[in-house]
Image (cartoon, helix red, strand yellow):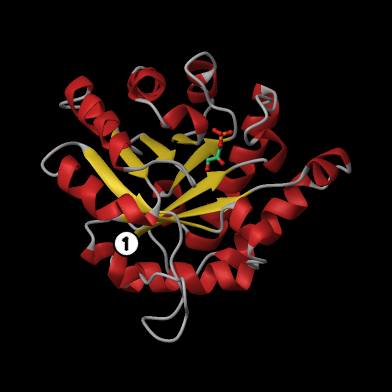
Amino acid sequence: MRRGLAAGNWKMNGTGASLSEIEALKAAHPDPSVEILICPPATLVERMSAVAKGSAVAVGGQDCHAAEAGAHTGDISAAMLTDAGATHVILGHSERRADHGETDANVRAKTEAALMGGLVAVVCLGESLDEREGGKTLDVIGTQLAGSLPDAITGANTVIAYEPIWAIGTGKIPTIEQIAEVHDFIRAELVKRYGAEGEAIRVLYGGSVKPSNAAEIFAVENVDGALVGGASLTAQDFSPIITALENA
Ligand code: 13P
């Protein structure tokens, strides 16, 4: 019942030359059975949206401010992203939580702003290695989930991404049992808080997803897709991940 979502987070990578990767993705996936999303740096949102127009590739931002407008140098609003052609925005990525001190309350406020602005929010959660080794993973995820999400969300306007911090960019992934445990927990928490709508909210896995491990991750119940960093930068790597999700 939940449609798969293959999402790419380009982070601080990519210039105009990288738009050829979108041309290649369009050509490789003219009519995919899953959703495809690429979140480039803000400088590329408008140009990428133009390149992706009319295709199955959606474009998203990597952050937005909680306010509609105002004196916030360097920041970008939900309305600016939609104006540039974005339909989605990543919020609360662990790199933003670490580099910019974003708290659960900040992420919740940003998510509210994104939803008000008509964007689909991709809200990120994840534990550190210390928290994992200390046996605190489910506590941490439960706290982030409770604090980062607004009270009224739907499967249509919000996606959760579970990204263990220690798996991001490291080539390490949790065991399949560990992924299943956290995704089952997130599903149960979503259903507890949002009722039937909690069944419709997609939960992505993120952290060192590659063409070589995508199929086994997508076979896990309650994994509805992936948020992919490094392997989303080229169509050559991202395309087989999309195909693995279509085949899951
Ligand atoms: P990698 O796929 O490079 O590990 O990054 C994951 C991530 O942080 C996506 O948001």
Q: Residue furthest right?
A: 134
Q: Position of residue 154 (x, y in %)?
A: 38, 59
At a point 10% along the width and 41% down the height, the residue shown is 54
Name the amino acid, label 1.
Leu
Closer to the camera in the image, 199 or 41: 41
Q: Position of residue 181 (x, y in %)?
A: 67, 35
User: Does the image show residue 151?
Assistant: no
Secondary structure under tag 1 reads: loop
Tell me the quadrant of the picture where the N terminus can be found.
Answer: top left
> How many numbered badges does the structure rendering display?
1
Left or right: 171 in relation to 140:
left
Q: Residue furthest bottom?
A: 71
Q: Position of residue 110 (x, y in %)?
A: 48, 70
- Quickly name the residue at label 1: 119
Closer to the camera in the image, 102 or 111: 102
Tell me the quadrant of the picture where the C terminus can be found.
Answer: top left
Q: Is residue 98 above or below residue 64?
A: above
At a point 33% along the width and 73% down the height, the residue shown is 116
Closer to the camera in the image, 51 or 30: 51
